[in-house]
Image: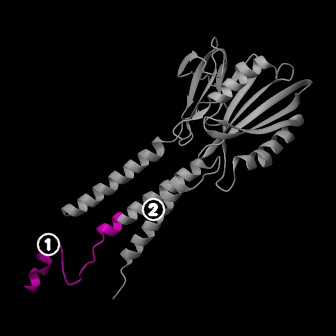
Amino acid sequence: MNKSRILIIAAGVVIIVAFSLYTFGSQSTAPRPGTKENPVNSGAAGSGGPASATVSTFVNRENPGNFYSIQFPSKASVEHGNTSGSYIAKLPQGVFSVQLVDIPDTSNVQLILLTQIQPALKSSLQDFNRVGYNQFTIGGHRAWGLTYTWKNGTIGMESIKAVVEGSDHSAAITFSGPRQGFGDQITNSTVIRPVVGSFHWIGQ
Amino acid sequence: MQFEIKYLIAILSAILIFGGLYLKFLYDVPDGEAITNMWVSWFLIIFGIIGIIVCALWQKRNPLEVESGDDTAFDGLR
């Protein structure tokens, strides 16, 4: 076997090994659902919340191309959700959930929200009723908000779902709580708006 | 002029690599299909690279030339 043949085989093996390491090394290793998540840091709230409130920052790097960070109040109990790249944060006022939503290249966030997410909510929630729909901006990205009421047994609930546009996936941030007190100024200014406003994509 | 089969293999290998790279980096993978996409793209690219290596190592043998260093078989002819 001459030298050039050895070089060709060596180069091929190196390329195969490198590509295999890249492929299998970049696979996300999502924690099991319900696993307690630890924040990357804690500190005072930004401009969205009162100066006295402290928030914890969570950075999610499970889905390549869809890295993001979000802040929850420090008193929130944050767990990993059912799907890769998702969080569930439990607060006395209600529950936040963050999850990534696949937006096909042939569709857009608004279309998915109205033709898939809303019908899915309607079929899965008791007495679903849409009460609001608007567009706004989060961290320089377009977002659409869906506000709706529903019933958990006999308890009246209200939710707001904000879907933030991303380069690949979008992120759906949902806050659900009892209707009584949901829309009051304190909950809105100290919990919902700061958390939703703290979301931003990393590297987009 | 006869078309050598190694060029056909090289073209097919290049197509495999292109397909694998497309699936890996450009295709919008639906939710829940990421693992399937990863394996399919990996196999396509690995088989493509192996095909290119085989083509690079391919040598057309001249039936009139004997590469064996064992000359004892021809001793009787000399």
Which chain does the numbered disc 2 sit on?
B
Q: At which x and y percent is residue A185?
A: 78, 19
Mark 2, secondary structure of its residue: helix
Residue A40 is a magenta residue: no
Name the foreground residue: B47 vs A135. A135
Does residue A116 show up? yes
Q: Quadrant of residue A204?
A: top right
Which region is colored magenta?
A: B53-78
Mark 1, secondary structure of its residue: loop
Which chain does the numbered disc 1 sit on?
B
Where does label 2 land, which residue?
B17
Residue B72 is a magenta residue: yes
Q: At which x and y percent is residue B63?
A: 24, 83
Point out the image quarter for the N terminus of chain B: bottom left
Circles 2 and 1 in contact, beta carbons < 8 Å = no
Q: At which x and y percent is residue B2?
A: 35, 86
Q: At which x and y percent is residue A155?
A: 89, 23
Q: CA distance from mark 2 to mark 1?
A: 41 Å
Mark 2 closeness class: few <14, some 14–19, many ≥20 residues within 10 Å: many
